[in-house]
Image (cartoon, coloured by chain):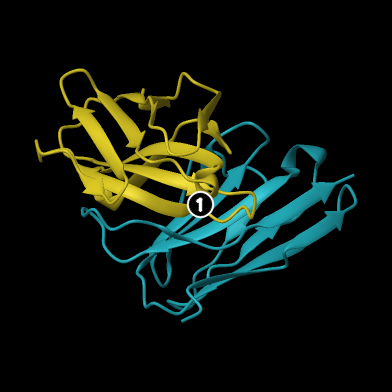
Amino acid sequence: AQTVTQSQPEMSVQEAETVTLSCTYDTSENNYYLFWYKQPPSRQMILVIRQEAYKQQNATENRFSVNFQKAAKSFSLKISDSQLGDTAMYFCAFRISAQGGSEKLVFGKGTKLTVNP
Amino acid sequence: NAGVTQTPKFRILKIGQSMTLQCAQDMNHNYMYWYRQDPGMGLKLIYYSVGAGITDKGEVPNGYNVSRSTTEDFPLRLELAAPSQTSVYFCASSYLRQSNSPLHFGNGTRLTVT
């Protein structure tokens, strides 16, 4: 079964500090893509960062970076210099392309992050 | 640039009623998706489409139907609404398969069935 597990339902961090959200996944596929999406109270889903499984180098986007450990099937998100606007639900997801043209994007249950002033 | 537009934003249905959730994208994306998000849960795929005229089931298709007559539009139909279909529905689109193309999401439709 292809699953995504986010073991931290809720987390909080002080403004300007660093926080790491964990994500593990299970798949037998070799080629896939990993994503972190952010969902603020406005409900919109916003892409934070993406990682190709074939790349060993960890992706970074400004204050956001990932620690991708393919052998361990781990894909954690680090947010540096946390800002109040980072308060949101964060979803880890991976996407694979299967035979016959089907496509799967599997989401975790999310981690609710609160940034405190 | 409108992106992915969903209508309506909110809707209350009585059990057994029918409705169509509309989704349109103006980015010329091939792939379109419908997800539902239940409280405290991630997104689950209902249906998806790889292009006009082609649709396929996702994880939770029962109780829903879709069509894709044009590249831009991907409506989701609920024929006999049930309380279990109370959820937030998201439409999404992407450009390419087998790539790191991210999904572009609409703002969601909150549906309550009573």
Instruction: In the rendered view, tell whether residue B33 sits above or below residue A1.
Output: below
| A104 sits left or right of B42 in the view | left
The front one of B51 and B87 is B87
Percent from the top left, x then y, of residue A69?
19, 25
Based on the displayed image, in which of its 4 quarters is residue A99 positioned?
Answer: top left
Callout 1: 10 Å neighbours few (<14), some, many (20+)? Answer: many
Q: Residue at x 53, y 68 (%)?
A: B74
Instruction: In the rendered view, tell whether residue B89 sits above or below residue A23.
Output: below
Q: The chain drawn yellow is chain what?
A: A
The front one of A17 and B94 is A17
Secondary structure found at label 1: strand
| A68 sits left or right of B29 in the view | left
Q: Residue at x 56, y 56 (%)?
A: A44
Percent from the top left, x then y, of residue A107?
44, 36
Instruction: In the rendered view, tell whether residue A30 sits above or below residue B77.
Output: above
Chain of the residue where label 1 is placed in the rendered structure: B
Task: Give the position of the C terminus of chain B as an image quadrant.
Answer: top right
The front one of A41 and A15 is A15
Residue B80 visible in rendering: no
Going by the numbered disc 1, the residue's amino acid type is Tyr
Q: Which residue is mark 1?
A: B47
Based on the displayed image, in which of its 4 quarters is residue A21 positioned?
Answer: top left
Percent from the top left, x then y, of residue A2?
35, 27
Residue B107 visible in rendering: yes
Picture mark count:
1
Percent from the top left, x then y, of residue B41?
59, 32
Q: Residue at x 35, y 69 (%)?
A: B30
Q: Residue at x 58, y 39 (%)?
A: A117
Q: The chain drawn cyan is chain what?
A: B
